[in-house]
Image (cartoon, helix red, strand yellow):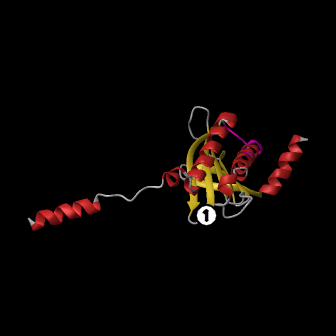
Amino acid sequence: MKVFLLLFMALFLTSCDPPVNENVLLERDKYDLANKVVSETAFQLQRDMNLIPFGTGRQICDQIQMLSLTFIYYKETEVSEARELVMEAFKVMAHLINSNEKIRSYLCEYPFDRNLEISIFFKKANGHDRDFGKLSICSIKKGEIEYTIQNSKYNYKTVLTETYEDAEKKFKTIDL
């Protein structure tokens, strides 16, 4: 009988949950806010620029340290068009993050731009990899844009690196 009573007490004490504050469940935390901004960016870039999202990344501890998005673009592209694509994608993501007031307190710095990373992988329109020696990847990370070609199945080589500021100057001179 004592064993039964002890089991009943243990079951009773461990089965009761403390009351839950419903507002805590409704509040968005830094992970939700980061996910929301990343998904909004991916959706907008897919809709407006035909960039197909296929990867995301985040570095979050106490604060949001880094956010990244990776895309596939089904068109053979040269450096000037790749520059335009990655810069426009970067501007959209930076704007969506920096204009979101709810996320600001979680950002490691504001404005949040040096910690954004965007990569675009270029494929042929039929979905196959581009020919060797052609531009395969364009990425922006920590204010630098890298252009990478594929030399063989597993061999990639960065052929050009430029700062965001230098790329912006080239981009503006093309527009004029």
In this rendered view, identify the residue nearer to me: 175 or 146: 175
77 part of magenta stretch: yes
Residue 137 in percent (x, y) is at 64, 48
Q: Nearer the viewer, residue 106 or 84?
A: 106
Residue 122 makes an appearance in the image: no
Q: Amino acid at mark 1?
A: Gln
Give the x, y percent position of residue 36.
59, 47
Q: Quadrant of residue 49?
A: top right
Rendering coords of residue 2 (x, y %): 11, 67
Quadrant for the N terminus in the image: bottom left
- Residue 124 forms part of the magenta stretch: no
**Tag 1 secondary structure:** loop
164, 116: nearer the viewer: 116
Residue under the point 56% across and 35% down: 127
In the rendered image, residue 10, in percent from the top left (x then y), is placed at 22, 64
Characterize the local packing of mark 1: few (<14), some (14-19) or many (20 or more) Cα atoms within 10 angstroms: some
Q: Main secondary structure of the magenta part?
A: helix
| Vertical order, 60 against 76 (above or below) | below
Single out the residue that lies furthest toward the right. Answer: 176
Residue 23 seen in the figure: yes
Residue receiving disc 1: 63
Disc tally is 1
Q: Quadrant of the C terminus?
A: top right
In the picture provided, is 127 more to the left or to the right than 137?
left
Query: In this rendering, is residue 62 above or below 161?
Result: below
What is the span of residues highlighted in magenta in the rendered image?
76-83
Farthest residue in the top direction? 126
Give the residue displayed 21% in from the left and 63% down from the top: 9
